[in-house]
Image (cartoon, rainbow, N blue to C red):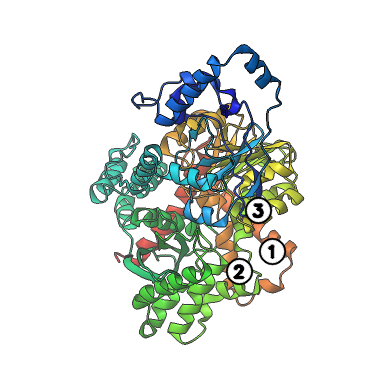
Amino acid sequence: MLMLLPGGGLGMNPTMDDMNLIQAQRHLVRDIGEEIDLEIGPGDDDPSFANTPLLGGPSQEPSAEEQGESKQMSMVSEIPNADQDILKAQPAKRKKKVVKRWREEWADTYKWAYVDVKEGTARIFCSVCKEYGRKHRRNPYGNEGSRNMQMSALEEHNNSLLHKEALRLQMASKDKIVVDKPIYVKALMSKTAGSIIEAALKRDPHEAEFIQSVQEAVHALERVIAKNPHYVNIMERLLEPERMIIFRVPWVDDRGETHVNRGFRVHFNQALGPCRGGIRFHPKMNLSVAKFLGFQQTLKNALSPYKLGGAAGGSDFDPKGKSDNEIMRFCQSFMNEIYRYFGTDKIWLSIVYFQDLPSEEMGVGIREMGFLFGQYRRLAGNFQGSFTGPRIFWSGSSLRTEATAYGLVFFARLILAELNKDVKGLRCVVSGYGKIAMHVLEKLVAVGALPITVSDSKGYLVDEDGFDYMKISFLRDLKSQQRSLRDYSKTYARSKYYDEAKPWNERCDFAIPCGSQNEIDQADAINLVNSGCRILVEGSNMPCTPEAVDVLKKANVIIAPAMAAGAGGVVAGEIELNHECNVMHWSPEDFESKLQEAMKQTFHRALKAADDFGYQKESPEALLHGAVISAFLTIAQAMTDQGCV
């Protein structure tokens, strides 16, 4: 009996059993239980692959199986012509089409595998190897008669050298500790101002995020310090937090395994009152980030109409992929540790801490806040009145996240009004996919703007028609169902998702980054300028690197700093704590009216401070420097009045 090679692969190069680098972008369609057709037909092999050199791989001799197939081909060529004609006349037997389900156990065992459609046919690819795809003469990802073919193919790839090397590099990149990261130091005209940064660098040389935020503040305060050298000592005291707490957070996962994370709480400055700030759960959370967030929050609270101190904190715990029970156990352990410093014998201090009114920072939402407060209530033995914010969270009436996002849009409108422009019809690029970003989209649609992008850690989504309320609702559904942004494009054809990319090259009139710190680097800033962006409203703390800020200022792009534009959350927090004004009985119109008035005060306070020190309101540095100046002068006056404490 004669055996014909599948796909008619005459003269196939044996190196086709190796790995090949492919550059095509892939879309994740890995749904458990989804039926996928993995049938292999003729022509699936890539003829050009035979001539592609391997990456760093030595040439291999043909396997015994391939040598046997070569001999069979020789036998075919030796058959008499008449017999060959008979063979050709016989119709080729078509393989029965097999439809097989993606098994749940495969997803559990091989977490790197996902299904993608390539040339109209579903295939299984590897997310660890990324650009690398598998190409074989006998495609191991198809059903070639064997019910175990897919499983064996997954096992084969799992044991391949390429996969193991890619996995090793991936783990190495996650575990890599950057200790010698160069810190970009801006040139200062004043030697006195430069000495402040020099002292901070000497004391905390490896805290890149904190040093960056200090540089931005000192750069904005050059003219202030030049007029009054007394402020040098004030600044030096301000840059050292009043209290830094670092503690371990042990917790047990659902499998009974013990883990240990690190917790932080930084009370930065209380000269204006009890310090308040957010809690962040993120793998990259460290003391430098906690100090930078606390410093920014201190200035933000001082600039807002409600004068308060600043704080920040959190943990390097990653809530993604964790069950509710795991998150609950972590939050309870976190509160157990922090409660050691704010016990029932220190009631006043505990009120100070919880007047932080921890906001829903990155990785912390209503669920996490509920678990934290529940454990605190259990330890304290009472329902602290100073925990009013979370009490409102339980009722579902809190407007903190809406207030922060709406305030960003109101601030953008104030800038546009100064330029005699209307927000209606303007294209806006938004980054992020969290609560702040989604509420920004919502308010942009309400005021008539055209938001066109959102982004996550893997790429960004652009909709040329712009988002509307129905599309925003669909985006929220995708997030609640833990589905990818890529699925949006399946419903709205005019949209597109770009892997491993940022939205800053999309044509826009203004931008609102709502992701994380330093998400916009120098190249991104150049893309923004070339895309027509003329206003950047910082929705996240310190979203631009120093190099990016320099590019934007040289291009006359107006930058609205987060400490001014993001003051809406501070306003909402104060209203929530105000027992005379119960926000649960406020109408949305009343609340927005109060929020707009507060943002207007913050805006004009920043412009006035800038004008007092010679920055024209048309200057791209006016808001950026004016906000810091106004906040610092408020804090400095309080610190001077209270003496050296």
Q: Quadrant of the N terminus?
A: top right
Q: Is residue 405 above or below residue 256?
A: above
Disc 1 from disc 2: Cα separation: 9 Å
Amino acid type at circle 2 is Ile
Q: Position of residue 80 (x, y in %)?
A: 59, 13
Please tell me whether mark 1 sits on a helix, a strand or a loop. Answer: helix
Q: Is residue 328 above or below residue 17?
A: below
Q: Quadrant of the C terminus?
A: bottom left
Mark 3 or mark 2, which is nearer to you? 3
Disc 1 from disc 3: Cα separation: 29 Å
Report which residue position mark 2 lands on.
575
599 or 191, nearer to the observer: 599
Q: Position of residue 322 (x, y in %)?
A: 49, 63
Report which residue position mark 1 lands on.
591
**Marks 1,2: beta carbons within 8 A:** yes
Mark positioned earlier in the residue sequence (3 or 2)? 3
Q: Horizontal placement of 24 versus 61: left or right? A: right
Q: What residue sits 45% from the left and 32% below the top?
A: 522
517 or 422, nearer to the observer: 517
**Marks 3,2: beta carbons within 8 A:** no
Please tell me whether mark 3 sits on a helix, a strand or a loop. Answer: helix
Please tell me whether mark 2 sits on a helix, a strand or a loop. Answer: helix
Report which residue position mark 3 lands on.
478
